[in-house]
Amino acid sequence: MEFRDLKKQYEVLKPRMDAAIGQVLEDSNYISGRQVAELEQELADYVDVRHCIACANGTDALTLALMAWGIQKGDAVFVPDFTFFSSAETVAYEGATPVFTDILEDTFNMDPDSLERAIHAVLAEGKLTPKAIVTVDLFGLPADYNRIRQIADKYDLYILEDAAQGFGGVYHGKRAGSFGDLAITSFFPAKPLGCYGDGGAIFTDQKEWADLLRSLRVHGKGSDKYDNVCIGMNSRLDTLQAAILQVKFRAFKEQELAETDRIAKIYAKELKDCVKVPQIPEGLGSGWAQYSILLKDSQERNQVEAHLKEHGVPCMIYYRKGMHQQTAFKDLSCYGETFEVTTSVCSRVLSLPLSPYLTEEDQQKVIRLIREKTM
Ligand SMILES: *Cc1c(COP(=O)(O)O)cnc(C)c1O
C-alpha cells in the first residue's frame, strides 16, 4: 500500500503523460516553453484570479511574495504554529520576524482569536511593525477567511495565503488560491496537484504585483531581458514540469479531486465513532492533501501508528511539533501564547493513506486496523 499512490496515477495517465513529455523533448524548449504560459492561464482560470505566476517550488513562491511586498527586518508576520516549516522559514529568511498563533482543533487552521491576541501583543510591545498574515490551508482545508479578512482589514495587514496543501479546497463558492492578497501553492509530488519534481505558483488579482513577481522570478529582469531592474532570484517552473502538470491538472479536475473526496467520506463514515475525523465546516471543501485523524492521547496515537506500520500500512505524523518548538526559532518571543491546541494536536494527530487511487480493499484494511486499536 502507498501513502499517496503516485505509481498507480502514472499507470493511469501514462499514454497522455508520455506524449506530453515527449513533446517537450522534441521541442527541446526546456525553459519558458509554451506549456508554462498555458498552464498559468489554466490555473488562473480554475482559481478564478487574474494572474498566476509559476515558479520553482512553493517555498520560493512564499519568498517571492514576501519580496514583492518588501517584507524585511523589523516587520512582524503572523503564522500558524501548526504548519510545514516553509510557512515561517521564508519570513525569517527575509529578515522579518514570524509571530506564531495557535490553531483550532476542529480545522487544524489558524485561530482568529489567537491571531488578534498576537497582533495586540506585538503592537503593545512596540518593537515590530505588523505587516502580513500567512494563512495556511492545512491538509487541504481553507482557513477561516471571513474572520481573518476582517482582522487583516482592521489592522491593515496583507494576507499571504499558503495554499501549498490547499489547492482544490473551497470556501463558500471560492477556490483556494483566491483568498490571499497574494496566494501560493506547491506542486511537490505529494501535494494535491503535484508534478514530477519541484514546482510552485503564485496567484493574485493585482497586476502591479504580478508584473513585479514575473521580474523577481527571473533575476529582477526589466522589460529588456539584459537590463536587471531589481535583485531577484532564479525561480522558474521548467517546461517539462509544466507539461506534466497540464496532464495531471486535467485528471485532477475531471476525476481525481472528486474521487479523493468520495474516499475521504468513507473514512469519515466508518471511523467517526472511534476517532476524531476531519471536520469540514458548512460551505467548505477540502483539497485533501492529507486525511488526518485525532486520537484520544499520545499513547493511543502511538499504538495505532505502530499497529498500522506492523501490518504494512504507511501512515505519517504531520506534525510532531509546533513552529515555536523548532530549534531554529528557539530565540523568538511567543508573546504570551501557550499553543495549547497545537501542542495537544501534535501528540494526537495521524495522517492516513489517501489518494484517488486508494483501493477499497486497502482502505477497508486501514479502517479495520484503526478500529481494532480504538474500540
Ligand atoms: C509543501 C509546503 C510548502 C513548501 O512547498 P515546496 O514546494 O515543498 O517548497 C509550504 N507550505 C506548506 C504548508 C507546505 O505544505
Image (cartoon, rainbow, N blue to C red):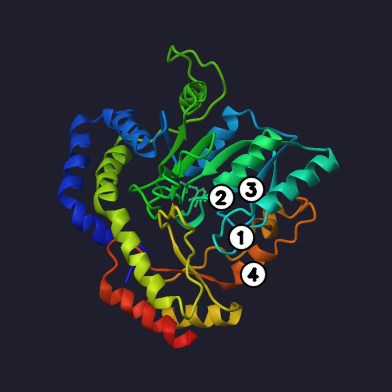
Instruction: Tell me how far mark 3 sits from mark 2, CA to CA.
Output: 14 Å
Dot 1: element: loop
Q: Which residue is mark 1?
A: 104
Q: Looking at the image, which is closer to me, 215 or 281?
A: 281
Residue 95 seen in the figure? no
Earlier residue among tags 4 and 1: 1
Q: Which mark is residue 344?
A: 4
Earlier residue among tags 4 and 3: 3
As drawn, 165 above or below 130: below
Residue at the spot x=51%, y=73% of the render? 276
Earlier residue among tags 1 and 3: 3
Q: Which residue is mark 2?
A: 144
Q: Position of residue 320 (x, y in %)?
A: 59, 66
Circle 1/circle 2 CB separation < 8 Å: yes
Residue at the spot x=33%, y=28% of the render? 32
Instruction: Tell me how far mark 4 sits from mark 3, CA to CA.
Output: 18 Å
**Viewer-nearest of discs 4 and 2:** 2
Circle 4/circle 2 CB separation < 8 Å: no
Inspect the image, locate mark 2, and give the three-letter code of the amino acid beneath it.
Asp
Inspect the image, locate mark 1, and give the three-letter code of the amino acid beneath it.
Leu
**Viewer-nearest of discs 3 and 2:** 2
Dot 2: element: loop
As drawn, 354 above or below 129: below
Dot 3: element: strand
Q: Position of residue 344 (x, y in %)?
A: 64, 69
Q: Which residue is mark 3?
A: 79
Instruction: Tell me how far mark 4 sits from mark 1, CA to CA.
Output: 11 Å
Earlier residue among tags 1 and 2: 1
Residue at the spot x=39%, y=48% of the render? 168
